Amino acid sequence: MSNFRQHLEEVEEKTFAPYAVFSGNSRGRTHSESPPKYRTHFMRDRDRIIHSTAFRRLEYKTQVFVNHEGDYYRTRLTHALEVQQIARTIAKALALNESLTEAISLAHDIGHTPFGHAGETKLNELMKDHDGFEHNVQGLRVVDVLEHKYSKFSGLNLCYETRDGIIKHETDYDTPKPIKSEFDPTSSPSLEGQIVNIADEIAYNAHDLDDGLKSDYINLEQLSKIDLWHNIYKKTDRKLEKQERIYMAIRNFIKLEVSNAIETTLTNIRESNIKSLKDVYSNPPLVKLSKDLENLNRELKDFLMQNLYKHYKVIKIMEKSKRIIEALFSIYIEETNQLPPQFQKTITEFGKERVICDYIAGMTDRFAQNEYEKLFFPFKQM
């Protein structure tokens, strides 16, 4: 076949819902490129994200537990993969563009700092007089500017629709800044982008339950008071060993949430008379859980906030993490010649505060800790 991409685009036209994002109708890239021969445009985006430096670094960035605390806890990388898997399932069931959904899923946390939300909070505080810091905005900056893989342009030169999904990603734990006009702040994300929002919440609730129970920061007795967990757990096979029963309950939790999201979204699409992508953009978000399940989820999320994310051991490491980031920021501000040469070269263009912010935000947990030791421990080898 002379051009397999065109064949793939024809398959999309025949199989996708009319309100999906079609690869052949993309608004394109900032920098002109020859189209791929064996992939759609969004497949190319997905692959570029996977091969990016920032994506690889997610392996050593905190989700809840700092990387060195245990090999079995989730990291930003494993979280991104779990989001991708859940989001792709939902996209497939709704006859939407799976490749675009995957690309947004894999990139949705690519702008995160070391040490999770604690790192983001501290960098935002340190940058308060310099337009702040928010990881969705940083994620777009990473794929537009900070990746250096290509000789003809900075960044990954992703399609507009992928970038729109990154900047408009939103959950309870994301506080997006005002979106620049390029992405029409009055417009809803595509359904593919909306799917990533809900898949993100499903994934982190599920894996934080798993990691929280493994760490003994939360326990089954506490969870028995949470209606959503109690209703799922009591239906699992009591003959199973404790850990196997927990695994089954978490799988059933994901299955329940995914099924509910698909069914509720289909109802919303039908009731809102969605016939085209234009209708998606002009309506409020349509990818949702039912009201009843959303209320049950709220109880669970409140429980996790109070008992896991605010557990005294988590708070201790997060506060220590903030001190590390603040110390690094202060010492680089004092003497920018301590930055790697490639960052020093961009100070004139972006300003020293933003460049230092970029450098720290790109660090892994381990690198930030090692850098702190090199700068503050007098006999640490450089």
Image (cartoon, grey):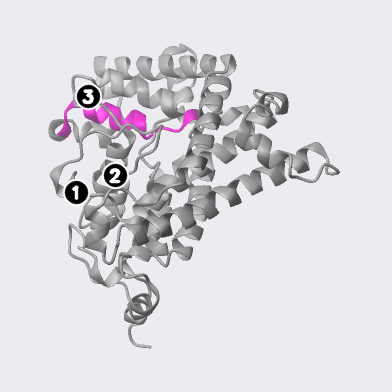
Q: How far apart in space, not on screen, are marks 1 and 2 (Cα)?
A: 9 Å
Q: Nearer the viewer, mark 3 or mark 2?
A: 2
Mark 3, residues whose alpha carbon is within 10 Å: few (<14), some, or many (≥20)? some
Q: Which residue is mark 2?
A: 168
Q: Which residue is mark 1?
A: 183
Taking 170 as reference, is 342 left or right? left
53 in relation to 66, above or below? below
For residue 48, what is the image quadrant? Answer: bottom left
Mark 2, residues whose alpha carbon is within 10 Å: few (<14), some, or many (≥20)? many
Q: Position of residue 228 (x, y in %)?
A: 61, 37
Q: Is residue 359 magenta?
A: yes
* Between discs 1 and 2, the one toward the N terminus: 2
Instruction: Give the residues in magenta.
Output: 350-365
Question: Secondary structure under badge 3?
Answer: helix
Q: Which residue is mark 3?
A: 353
Characterize the magenta stretch by its predominant secondary structure: helix
| Mark 1–mark 2 CB contact (< 8 Å) | yes
Residue at x 18%, y 45% (from the top left corner): 186
Q: Position of residue 166 (x, y in %)?
A: 32, 47
For residue 275, what is the image quadrant? Answer: bottom left
Q: How far apart in space, not on screen, are marks 3 and 1 (Cα)?
A: 26 Å
Question: Secondary structure under badge 2?
Answer: loop
For residue 177, what is the image quadrant? Answer: top left
Q: Amino acid at mark 3?
A: Glu
Q: How many marks?
A: 3
Q: Position of residue 11 (x, y in %)?
A: 38, 79
Q: Is residue 164 visible?
A: yes
Residue 302, numbered label: none
Residue at x 32%, y 19% (from the top left corner): 329
Front residue of 309/266: it is 266
Q: Is residue 28 magenta?
A: no
Q: How far apart in space, not on screen, are marks 3 and 2 (Cα)?
A: 25 Å
